Image (cartoon, rainbow, N blue to C red):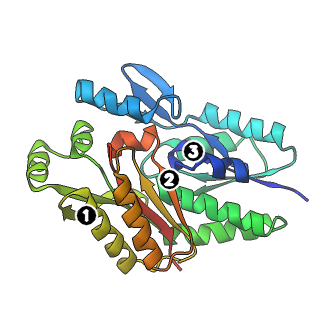
Amino acid sequence: MTRIILSTESGADLPKELVEKHQIQVVPMHVIMEGKDYLDGELSVEEVFDYHRRTKKIPSTAATNEHEYQALFKQIRVDFPDSIIVHIGYTSKASASFQSALIASEDFENLYLIDTLNVTGGLAAVVLYAANLLEQDPAIEPVQFIEKIEAIVPKTRLAFLPGSLDFLKAGGRVSNIAYIGGALLKIKPCIELKEGKLVSTTKYRGNMSVVAEKLMRDYLSQYNINRQQLYLIYSIGLAESIKERMEEVAKEAGFEKVTWMQAGAMISTHAGPGGFGIAGIEN
């Protein structure tokens, strides 16, 4: 039986234990700070936040390049000879990573790429859906497998509240006027993926303990998320009391399983400390 191997980028923020359980191959994206290029994972989130405290700047981020994808795919072939590789990628609308993977894939046979049009927990939701399919049916035909994954891509929903407008301002994503108004009114913009692009949708007012619950209830009202699994995302600094409350709300809404994911350096560079997000797949 030919084995299917999954790969994705570090921007999926997959928990380490799930990466190991499903043998998912993860290629790092890049975080560039003080002139040095770090692979995502080499730099701790705390170092990113400390850099902002010292300089009021944030690191920049960069895509995985085609040579890194070539190295990834070659290594998979060494570790899993005769395997079929299915690469489930970071949205092509917000990073050059997927284009680099496409270029690298030209040198390989039995390699398929899927653009999830999503990031962080949304990307992870698709990857783990695929991993669970393989766990349930290891002999699934590759064509059927890919069709099933592609079918849930447009049903995958991610919503995220940045923990700090300071990081959005430092990255040039909000103007000074919007920043000042938002800070005074304690406004937190909800970021969602729309056709693969990061878009600011609802603006919530209040502290994170209030707006996180508002977001959760709005999200569950707007989207008919499959109750088998919900992914909750946080960046370092989110209060434990908020995490506990969000889990209670999820359980009250009938979710069988809730999986928490910590945003890595790549995503935290944009979210700032204390961010909160939700991801799931619609029925």
Question: In the image, which is nearer the foreground, mark 3 or mark 1?
Answer: 1
Instruction: Give how far apart the Cα atoms at labels 3 and 1 are.
Output: 30 Å
Q: Examine the rendering and report whether any part of residue 201 can be seen.
A: no
Where disc 3 sits, the SS reads: strand
Q: Is 163 situated above or below 125? A: above
Question: Which badge, 1 or 2, is on the more N-terminal residue?
Answer: 1
- Residue type marked 2: Met
Cβ–Cβ under 8 Å for marks 1 and 2: no
Residue drawn 57% across the image and 71% down it: 152
State the image quarter where residue 189 is shown. bottom left
Residue situated in front as seen by the camera: 117 or 40: 40
Percent across and percent down for residue 266 are 44, 39
Instruction: Give how far apart the Cα atoms at labels 2 and 3 are.
Output: 15 Å
Residue situated in front as seen by the camera: 73 or 260: 260
Q: Examine the rendering and report whether any part of residue 41 can be seen.
A: yes
Residue under numbered circle 2: 261
Where disc 2 sits, the SS reads: strand
Labelled disc at residue 9: 3
- Residue type marked 3: Glu
Residue drawn 36% across the image and 20% down it: 34
- Residue type marked 1: Val
- Quadrant of the rendering where the N terminus is positioned: bottom right
